[in-house]
Image (cartoon, rainbow, N blue to C red):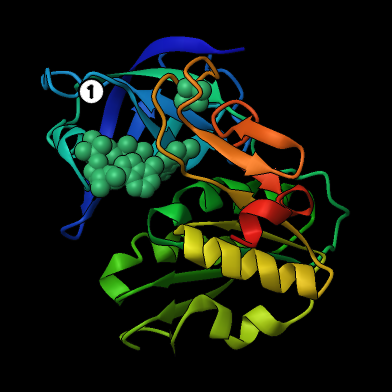
Amino acid sequence: MKEIHDFKIIRREQLGQHYFRLVLQHGGTMQPVAPGQFVEVQVEGRPEVMLRRPISVHDVDQETGTMSLLIQIVGNGTRRLAELREGDSLNLVYPLGHGFSTDIASGSRALLVGGGAGIAPLLHLSKVLGTKGVRPTILLGGRTADLIPVRDDFEPYGTLCIATDDGSLGHKGLVISHPAFAESYNIIYTCGPTPMMKAVARSAAERGIRCEVSLENLMACGVGACLCCVTDTDQGHRCVCKDGPVFDTAKMGKWMNV
Ligand SMILES: Cc1cc2nc3c(=O)[nH]c(=O)nc-3n(C[C@H](O)[C@H](O)[C@H](O)COP(=O)(O)OP(=O)(O)OC[C@H]3O[C@@H](n4cnc5c(N)ncnc54)[C@H](O)[C@@H]3O)c2cc1C
Ligand code: FES
């Protein structure tokens, strides 16, 4: 069930120049949040930022009622959010959208491919896969090493592989040129820049591997009312906020090949 709630910021970490992470405390009973679902964050103190901003749920601890957000500073809204401090409150609408499917058999081979801020939802996903008996390969990419924040946090939950454009860490090149990408998998999950996700999805389709992409279209309402986030699927136009953000690429031929 969706909830509008003031969370308390109990920890704030600056992660280099471009990213920060907020750990939020619900203070009561937090709604269950599936991997790949997102929140709409209210940005206060900046009248020009009227609309809430969609941010993936990065990590969840249902028992303690905490969730984390990993945020890249790109514009007025995220710059304002970066000014928040521990003890401040943050109003969220959550949980939103349909997340990744995690109903896979124990021992399945899963690959998680993340780029840029798209690595955010993959931490919660890798933890949930672990509870299903799946230890995924986690392939994270970025232009440089400092643009792949929190990579060490993934280490306990899978086999971590890194690709950087400049070779400052891990494999030098795009994620799809990393040797781990060419291995065989039962499923590939991906979130990040659209060209990266399309390349991952096309390769998965060629190899007959099931693939799920998490789209990050521009959003306004976040609940399927304004139609500003629609994407073209093989079943017609769909709202990324309500019908996604995660889509099975078996139904995304049009999106994949444009
Ligand atoms: C479902 C979903 C989950 C997301 N999860 C995360 C997350 O976990 N962490 C994170 O850092 N960001 C995430 N984003 C992206 C985030 O919502 C935007 O970066 C944010 O709204 C930008 O707000 P702003 O006011 O700072 O920038 P604006 O001033 O609104 O925009 C600044 C620049 O960023 C571009 N931009 C804005 N939104 C997006 C977007 N969705 N995709 C690509 N470019 C965009 C604009 O075109 C513009 O060039 C997510 C987006 C979606 C739709
Ligand atoms: S953001 Fe309004 S319909 Fe998706």
Q: Is mark 1 within 8 Å of ligand 1?
A: yes
Position of residue 94 relative to residue 144, above or below, is above
- In the image: residue 76, left or right of residue 255: left
Q: Residue 88: tell me if it is visible.
A: yes
Q: Residue at x 23, y 23 (%)?
A: 43
Task: Check disc 1: other Cα within 10 Å, few if <14, some if 14-19, many if 20+.
Answer: many
Quarter of the figure with the C terminus: bottom right
Q: Residue at x 37, y 59 (%)?
A: 150
- Residue placed most toward the observer, 139 or 157: 139
Quarter of the figure with the N terminus: top right
Q: Residue at x 52, y 51 (%)?
A: 123
Residue 233: percent from left, percent from top: 69, 43
Position of residue 195 relative to residue 244, above or below, is below
Position of residue 161 relative to residue 243, above or below, is below
- Residue 50, by quadrant, is top left
For badge 1, the amino acid type reads Val
The residue under label 1 is 43
Q: Residue 28: tell me if it is visible.
A: no
- In the image: residue 179, left or right of residue 79: right
Residue that protrudes farthest toward the right in the picture: 105
- Residue placed most toward the observer, 60 or 163: 163
Residue 103: percent from left, percent from top: 82, 44
Secondary element at image label 1: loop
Residue 116: percent from left, percent from top: 38, 60
- In the image: residue 113, left or right of residue 132: left
Residue 12: percent from left, percent from top: 23, 40
- Residue 156, by quadrant, is bottom right
